[in-house]
Amino acid sequence: MNSGTDAGRPGLGRRIMLWVGAIVVVLSAGIGWLVGSNGSIEISEAAILGTGVTIPVTPAAVALYGVAVSVLLLGVLFGLVELASRLEGENAGSEPRP
């Protein structure tokens, strides 16, 4: 049984998150490549999120767009996790507020 005082393996969570992030980015590129390959038959350009900004529907362009979006979202998510971890570490020694 774990007594609750064991801190675990330092850095393990960070390594797991980086591996998951890398897998998501690679999957985004692969799915973008497939969508770009099949979509270019029907249309030549696609609007991004319904805006006036368009990207060409080619395998490389859609794959790059998928990578960019996934890196941006994962960067924000991982940044928030890092912030929460630091805030939790700062408050670990303080008394709980009533």
Image: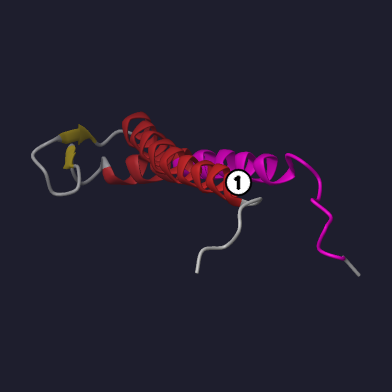
Q: Which residue is mark 1?
A: 20
| Start-end of magenta stretch | 3-28
Relative to 14, is 84 on the left or the right? left
Instruction: Give above or below for 4 relative to 36.
Output: below
On-image quarter of the N terminus: bottom right
Please give the name of the residue rendered at 39% of the width and 35% of the height, measured from the top-left corner. 63
Relative to 88, is 68 on the left or the right? left
Dominant secondary structure of the residues highlighted in magenta in the image? helix
Q: Position of residue 11 (x, y in %)?
A: 73, 39
User: Which of 44/74 is in front?
Assistant: 74
Q: What colouring style does the render use?
A: secondary structure
Q: Position of residue 45 (x, y in %)?
A: 17, 37
View extreme (left): residue: 52
Q: Position of residue 21 (x, y in %)?
A: 55, 42
- Badge 1 marks a residue whose secondary structure is helix
Instruction: Give above or below for 60 relative to 86.
Output: above
Relative to 72, is 1 on the left or the right? right
Q: Position of residue 56 (x, y in %)?
A: 22, 32
User: Which of 88/48 is in front?
Assistant: 88
Please give the name of the residue rendered at 58% of the width and 50% of the height, measured from the top-left corner. 91
Q: Given the image, on which type of amino acid does mark 1 rest? A: Val
Label tally: 1
Give the class, few, some or many, for how many residues have Cα within 10 Å of label 1's Cα (few <14, many ≥20): few
Please give the name of the residue rendered at 36% of the width and 46% of the height, measured from the top-left corner. 35
Q: Is residue 42 magenta?
A: no
Instruction: Give above or below for 36 relative to 60.
Output: below
